[in-house]
Amino acid sequence: MAKYIVKRVLAAIATLFVLVTVVFFLVRLMPGEPFTNPKLTPEVAANMRSYYGFDKPLIEQYGTYINNLLHGNFGYSMKYTNKTVNSIIAETFPFSADLGIRALVMAISFGIVLGSLAALNRGKKLDFVCVIVAILGTSIPDFIMGCVLQYFFGIKWGLLPVAQYKGFSYTILPATALAFYTLASVSKLMRSSMLEVVQQDYIKTAKAKGLSKFRITWKHQLRNAIMPVITMLGPTVASVLTGTFVIESIFAIPGMGKYYVESVSNNDYAMILGMTVFYGFFLVFCNLIVDVAYGFVDPRVRIGKK
């Protein structure tokens, strides 16, 4: 198991290195630069280029960035005066993470329950309802779902606030809108996995032994059917926890999305690089955790990787 974990860690480090390298050079290929503001005099623009190291060869800029990155320094924003990318991430990520955690708990718990119920009641009304929910969830974009929830629960019925992030009641609508797609995806995957597991020989053997339906469902069907769900959790957790730009904008949540979008518009290289690397690190880390967890849950994985 230790050898398997070491291999996964090394693969994660290599992935991050490739990500940083590719993003660094792609950002430099973007049209324009951060200092093309007509309000800046040529002298001021030249001083800023020198300050941020843009007057040096590209390979030297890359080396400097890698060195700063190894020390956990994403650099200074080129748009927000005297603010580091680290400080902006530290200010905004808690909001995105809080919203993401709420959405994840809702999506995974309800998704597993709905998918399991649909499979156990195949062909019945409950199965039909669960399938409709899954289809709607994967078909309706997040921003449409957010606007619908705002209209009915916030404006028409006045049950919940439509924007801001000041308390628990403010989190219900954005978390639901963010969770709906993941909930539907988990539900569909869980249903198909459960239906596949039901046909396995060990389920028929368990029934032949006279085991109770609850024990067969809980110990044999759910435990094996949940494997594909665990596999998809890595990228799902990373994408949800780091926030959804549109949902944060619709509900006026002070998360990372606003700064990320603005950084692209403003050619804020430091912000683009910093947040992309942060997102990438989070995605790779979540996938690593899922890989290790999968190795513990299913011994065939770590044996096959030796």
Image: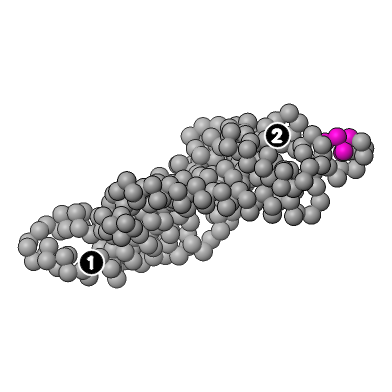
Amino acid bearing label 1: Val
Residue bearing the label numbered 2: 76
Residue 103 lies, in percent from the top left, at 46, 45
Check disc 2 and give the amino acid type: Tyr
Crowding around mark 2 (Cα neighbors within 10 Å: few <14, some 14 to 19, many 20+) is many
- Whether residue 135 sits left or right of residue 261 in the image: it is left
Q: Locate residue 208, reporting x and y percent.
A: 8, 66
Q: Verify whether residue 80 appears in magenta.
A: no
Whole-percent x and y of residue 69? 61, 38
- On the rendered structure, is 5 left or right of 69? left
Q: Is residue 78 visible?
A: yes
Say which residue appears at 31% left-offset and 64% top-offset: 193
C-alpha gap between disc 1 and disc 2: 56 Å
Q: Which element is circle 2 on?
A: loop
Q: Which mark is residue 198?
A: 1
Q: Is 88 rendered above or below residue 175?
A: above
From the top left corner, tell me how far across and down residue 146 is, in percent.
56, 51
- The nearer-to-camera label among 1 and 2 is 2
How many badges with numbers are in the image?
Answer: 2
Residue at 45% x, 48% y is 10
Quarter of the figure that contains the C terminus = bottom left
Report which quarter residue 262 is drawn in.
top right
Q: Which residue is at the front of the view, 125 or 69?
A: 69
Residue at the spot x=58%, y=34% of the render? 72
> Where are the magenta residues, as a range?
44-48
Q: Nearer the viewer, residue 69 or 279?
A: 69
Is the residue 70 above or below the residue 27 in the image?
A: above
